Amino acid sequence: MASYDVIVIGGGPGGYVAAIRAAQLKKKTAVVERDKAGGRCLNYACIPAKTVLNTAEIYAEVTENGAELGLKSQTSIDWPAVQARREKVSKTLEDGVTMLWKKNKIDFLAGEASLEGAGKVKVGSDSHEAKTIILATGSVAMSIPGIDFSDRVLDTWGAWSLPKMPKALVVAGAGASGSEIASAYARMGVKVTLVEMLDQLLPAEDRDMARVVERQFKKDGIELLLGTKVEGVKETKTGVTVTAGDKQIKADHLLIAGGRSPDTDALRLEAAGVETEEGGRIKVDDFMLTSANGIYAIGDLVRGPALAHKAAEEGVVAAEHGTGTPTHPVDLSLVAGATFCHPQVAGVGMTEEEAKASGREYKVGKFKLGGAGASVVYDDRAGLVKIIGDPEYGEILGAHIVGNRACDMISELVVTKALEGGYQELARIVHPHPTMSEAVLDAARAVEGWPIHA
């Protein structure tokens, strides 16, 4: 039996970060992973998705706007090359994680892990023990009731790893994952139908942001069926017929991008006294400690949004608290959402709908990206920056951006909010010109009615 200070179960963005932080704190550390270093995010989700999205962005830019940009070309999609690059990108990052584990003298225990209680972890036929155990096994895809995954009914990984370029797809679920899939394939010339049971595209986002994306999706040829459920599917060897509302839609595949559930089946949580709550998520305190002494849980296993960057920071907190190092909890109100469809959507804090429902006083500043000089240069004029502020103290209650660089731009607003800066301070910070970040400056000024370029 090997003995460690810290064992991390799961080598994804939460787990590998937790292991590195524990090793930095001079603790003997091991990671258990049944698949590849980097977990689902690097190998099957975030990174593969963004790699294919990047190809779609470049292809659409050249084919749709090339002439205006002064570019002449004959361009087509080489699908095997797209998939080869996706694999290469993931392998590069997987190797990078493995290198970091080796650099930090972290043991990689390959296999399926289960808890045995009393600080013991079983991996295959071997048992190990640790003072601190961090659970970071992520989540698994959920299908639609009555519909099973198959060769023609795919989860998000199936969507990004299709062996053959499809001609038509139906995507069920218009949240972040579904919208990214729909956007990528539509921009590569695939006929896409996007079905969402709620009445808003990207239901978790501010409604003003969703409207901008909806207009672009329609422009890209995506058929949107909002307020509609996928009720059934008939499969053949060559495709599917999907029943959505009163429509029958023929396509090569149905892609289900709905909910996900915590991946805990193999862990044997009960054996270690780890309690769960609604939806199978693991109960944790502010420092990610479960009901079992010495066992922590992070990422998709616990409350809050299922985001890689949230999991990574929770991994740091769990590693520090579990090793007796001073730390502070993750503030979920400061975890930004990021959706990499076209245009991108990013937000932190309250939406306007949430601010209104809270009953508190608030003011809103909006600034269209088209008012920033850089937007003309980078063809990013349709987007919007929106800031929701507290008029009494100037606090930024929420901030939302839709545009080609939204996921990079949101960090400035997260930092301002985290450091307790207000929209008044943001309105006086000099921003470099010409950049898209100048739209944030004018949005902050718009809260009090004095944007310069509107």
Image (cartoon, rainbow, N blue to C red):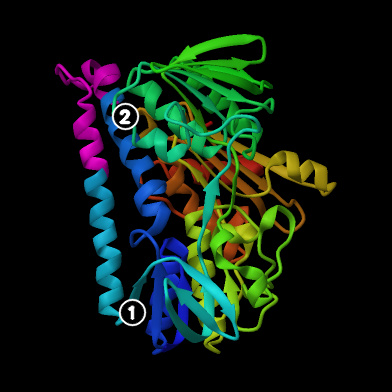
- Residue 40 lies, in percent from the top left, at 42, 53
Q: Is residue 342 visible?
A: no
Q: Nearer the viewer, mark 1 or mark 2?
A: 1
The magenta segment is 61-86
Q: Main secondary structure of the magenta part?
A: helix
**Callout 2: helix, strand or loop?**
helix
* Three-letter amino acid code at the position of disc 2: Ala
Viewed as shown, does residue 215 lie left or right of 51? right
Residue 156 is labelled as none
Residue 62 inside the magenta-drawn segment = yes
Residue 279 inside the magenta-drawn segment = no
* Three-letter amino acid code at the position of disc 1: Ile
Task: Residue at 37% x, 36% y: name it.
Answer: 160
Q: Is residue 413 visible?
A: yes
Give 124 or 26, whichever is nearer the viewer.
124
- Residue 346 lies, in percent from the top left, at 52, 43
- Residue 388 lies, in percent from the top left, at 67, 45
**Callout 1: helix, strand or loop?**
loop
Task: Residue at 40% x, 18% y: name it.
Answer: 237
Q: CA distance from mark 1 to mark 2?
A: 38 Å
Task: Residue at 64% x, 56% y: name it.
Answer: 304
The answer to whether 123 is drawn above or below residue 325 in the figure is above
Q: Classify residue 269 by image quadrant.
A: bottom right
Q: Which residue is mark 2?
A: 56
Q: Which residue is mark 1?
A: 106
The answer to whether 314 is drawn above or below residue 154 in the figure is below
Q: Residues within 10 Å of mark 2 (few under 14, many from 20)?
A: many
Q: Residues within 10 Å of mark 1 (few under 14, many from 20)?
A: many
Task: Residue at 22% x, 16% y: name it.
Answer: 67
